[in-house]
Amino acid sequence: MPDSEAERRLRGVGLPATVGPYRIVRQLGEGGMGVVYEGLHEALARRVAIKVLRSDFSAGASAMERFFNEARAVNLIEHPSLVQISDFNRQPDGSAYLVMELLRGESLAARLRRGPLPGVMLLQVAWQLADVMVAVHAKGIVHRDLKPDNVMLVPEPIAPGGERVKMLDFGIAKLAHSVGHQTQSNILIGTPAYMSPEQCRGAGQVDARSDVYSLGVVLFEAIAGRPPFRGDAGELIARHLFAQTPMVASLAPRCDRQLGLLVDRMLAKERERRPSMQQVRAELHRLLSQHQNPSPLSAAVPMVGMQGLPGGSRVPPSKLERPVAQTDSRRWQWRLMVRVVAALSTLGMFGLMRWPGALRKQLNPQQPVAPGRELKAAVAPLPANLPALVQPLLPPETAPASTPPARPRRNSRAHHGPESASPPASRDQGQPQDEQKQSEIKNEAILGDVD
């Protein structure tokens, strides 16, 4: 009977159909150094992932050292975002293998192929990556191969956003105080699209700040939908070393400004200018908290790290649409308030213009108010005894020159008759009337001045 394709692949890596208590179910992935299979422990009904180093690499000391590094690195760190390794051994033919927990989810690379990540999901993934890398660096380990293919997103209800980040592949990690094989300084190790400038010069020159740069490239791609540099391996290395890194805002204008500036700092050519991984984690945590619990000022500005929601996103669209709706509502409220204040001001000015005339009519409804005198008339009503009050203030009148009394005529009646005495009497009676008329004319003049 001819061999099946699976059996031929199993023999190609020197692994039989079963490994100890595990039976090989299917192939999960394949890389340059080995193959990953799904295994089943039939007695416990437990499924695991088995990473097998190819037989041609198992004979080399360098490849075996890198393979052991992964087991040692994971065992040195206790963090929920690291894949647990439960067994490490060799087959009778000399091929080595690792037994790890089986992850159910998708890689970050597969997620990014559907488009950039939305703001809240991006911050949750970025913060978890920075958090696990802080734990890795605390043990003196540099990953040196941080990329979307080595990040898994696994459903977990208690994790931020309902997904747990899992960091994979510590095969080329640089362990501090490692015993035995040391990395040569002139060897290029890593994936060119995500390598730091110092990593492009040589693997022996890297430290924790190299992982900061690689994480910055990953975040740049998650925001803009593409890495900062593209090309073949040689072009990528040259651009990481000498080309000016594009700013995040130039390719993703809608990206949150503070997040974009953080990624720009992480991608600095000089590693002294990059923030530490602890600083990156703290800044991402601040941005995530600000987005989940927005203040009244920040709620008006949506945090968006993408051009649109990708298909299959687990983030409800309402979380991104709510700040925009709040902004429109506030603008409508402000416009209504301005219109109401303007209307009240107009009515108030109109009332002030009409008030003096109306008050005058109420005080003296019989007398019409002349134009231009409404304000004067509204000050106070004129008293009835105004002439008597004003008379003492007037200057005294000049008395007429006294005339000598007329001499009585003798025999007036005899010469003129009884009608001759009437004219003097009439002059004496008309003089008080003339004085009264003059006084009234003066009083009217004074009243006119007062008005």
Image (cartoon, rainbow, N blue to C red):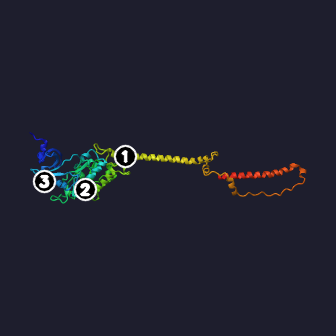
Amino acid on which disc 3 is placed: Gly
Q: Residue placed at 89% from the left, 52% from the top?
A: 412
Q: What residue would you read off at disc 1?
A: 324
Q: What residue would you read off at disc 3?
A: 60
Q: Residue placed at 45% from the left, 47% from the top?
A: 337
Q: Earlier in the sequence, mark 1 or mark 2?
A: 2
Label 1's element? helix
Amino acid on which disc 2 is placed: Val
Task: Give residue 248's mark.
Answer: none
Whole-percent x, y for residue 87 in the image: 15, 51
Task: Give residue 134's mark.
Answer: 2
Label 1: how many Cα within 10 Å (few below 14, some 14–19, many 20+): some
Task: Determine the residue located farthest toward the top in the rendered image.
Answer: 1
Labels 3 and 2 touching (C-beta < 8 A): no
In 3D space, how far apart are the residues under numbered discs 3 and 1 (Cα atoms)? 59 Å
In 3D space, how far apart are the residues under numbered discs 3 and 2 (Cα atoms)? 32 Å
